[in-house]
Image (spheres, helix red, strand yellow):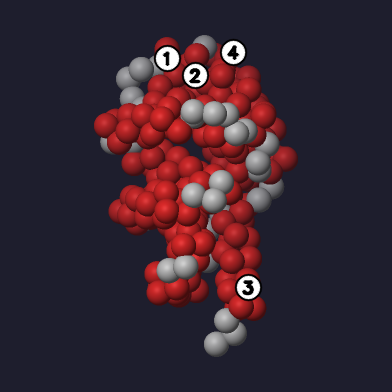
Amino acid sequence: SEAKGMLRNHQGELGAARDLFRNALIIARRDRDRLAEFQALANLVMLELEQHEHAEAEALSGELLIIGEKVREGSEAPFAQTLASLSRYALGYENVGSDLDEALDQLRIADAKHRLAYALSCAADLDLREGQAERAAVRAGEALRIASLLHRASDVAWARVLFARAALARGDGQAAAEVLQELRDQPRQEISERVRQEMDALLARQEAVDPA
C-alpha cells in the first residue's frame, strides 16, 4: 500500500494516495511493525503539509513523535520533530523557529539527506509565505545542493522553484534568471504532478512579466 500510495501521490491522485497510506498504517499497526507505521504516518503528514492541510498535519505529527521515540536507530525521531515543527510553523505558532532549526540540525547530524532536502524545501516554502525571502533562499539553496547529489528529479525541481521564488522576492534578477532557465531545461518525465504544476505556474508568471 505504501509504494502504491507514493506512486499515486507522484501522479497527483491525492485522494487515492491518502487512502493507501492510511491502509498501510492499519496494516503496520496490525503487524506491530513500528518502522512501517512510522513511514506510513510520515507519508500522511507530508501529504497534508503539501496540500496545506496544516491542522491535520499537526495532529498526525503528534502521533508520529510518539512512534519516532520508539524507533531510534536512524533519523526517524529527528524527522518526526522536523515535521511537527513544520506543521506548527505553518499554523503560525510563536517561537517555533528555534525548534525547527534544531530539528534540521539533527537531520544533518543523522546524515538523512533525502529527509533533510524535503524538510528544507518545506521550510523554504513556509518562509516565503511569511515574507522571509533571505532565509528561504538559504534553505532552498541547501535543499537544491542535496537533491542534486541524490539525483532526485522532483526534489531538484521543487528546490529550484523555491530558490527562484526567493530570488525574485529579494530582487535578485540574475540568480532568478539562471534558475528559471534551469527549470525550462529540466526534463519533465520524472517530476511529480504537484511539482510540475508549480513549475509551470512560476514559468508562466515570469513569461507574462518578461516575454523576452
The numbered mark, 3 or 1, whose residue comes first in the sequence reads: 1
**CA separation in Å, label 2 and label 3:** 40 Å
Q: Residues within 10 Å of mark 2 (few under 14, many from 20)?
A: many
User: Mark 1 and 2 residues: CB-CB less than 8 Å, in contact?
Assistant: yes
Question: First in sequence: mark 4 or mark 3?
Answer: 4
Local packing at callout 1 (Cα closer than 10 Å; few below 14, some 14-19, many 20+) is: some
Q: CA distance from mark 1 to mark 2?
A: 6 Å
Give the position of the C terminus as an image quadrant: bottom right
Q: Which residue is mark 1?
A: 69
Q: Earlier in the sequence, mark 2 or mark 3?
A: 2
Which residue in the protein does label 2 denote? 65
- Residue 204 tag number: 3
Query: Given the image, on which type of amino acid does mark 3 rest?
Result: Ala
* Residue that label 4 marks: 30
Q: Give percent across and percent down for residue 9.
A: 61, 45
Q: Badge 3 local density, few (<14 within 10 Å), some, or many (20+)? A: few
Q: Amino acid at mark 1?
A: Glu
In front: 196, or 137? Answer: 137
Secondary element under disc 2, as helix, strand or loop, is helix
